[in-house]
Image: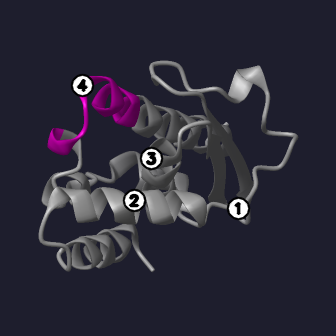
Amino acid sequence: MSIKEIEDSIVEEFSMFDNWMDKYEYIIELGKGVPVLDHKFKKDENLITGCQSRVWLGCEIKDGKLWFSADSDAIITKGIISLLIRAFNGQKPSDIITADLSFIEAIGLKENLSPTRANGLVSMIKQIKDYALAYNSLKNV
């Protein structure tokens, strides 16, 4: 599935909710479903800077595609990173780099987060795209 198709699916899911309290509850449920992060990734060098809570992001490349795993000490943040991982897992670095992430605006996520959580969201996206840039440049070496 392409990033755009996954984004459309996320937008469709969020359209079922009438208000942001229900959407927050859904994000929390998503966070509860995040698999346990492999201990090899739960290191300081995998902490995302710029997040109010602690967020670890691991990335591996398999067959030219990136696979992410994450954890956070805050359940809502864990839910947010799970949405990003869902959109980007199993995608080529070049597709991640060029993704516009229109689903974030379409579901109203950024404007319904506190300023510190919104900054954290931007930091999470930046880290994912940085991994994609790094792996893409390795491919071109």
Image marks 1 and 3: residues in contact by CB distance under 8 Å: no
Whole-angstrom CA distance, mark 3 to mark 4, is: 14 Å
Residue 45, horizontal then vertical, whole percent = 73, 22
89 to 104, vertically: above or below: below
What residue sits 54% from the left and 39% below the top? 74
Position above or below: 70 against 24: above
Task: Determine if the magenta segment contains residue 39.
Answer: no
Residue bearing the label numbered 1: 35
Query: What residue sits right under mark 2 in the picture?
Result: 27
- Secondary structure of residue under mark 4: helix
Q: Which residues are magenta?
A: 111-122
Residue type for callout 1: Pro
Q: How many marks?
A: 4
Q: Identify the residue position indicated by label 3 in the image.
A: 76
Q: Position of residue 106 (x, y in %)?
A: 14, 60
Residue 28: where, in percent of width, then height?
45, 57
First-in-chain label (4 vs 1): 1
Which numbered disc, 3 or 4, marks the residue that appears first in the sequence?
A: 3
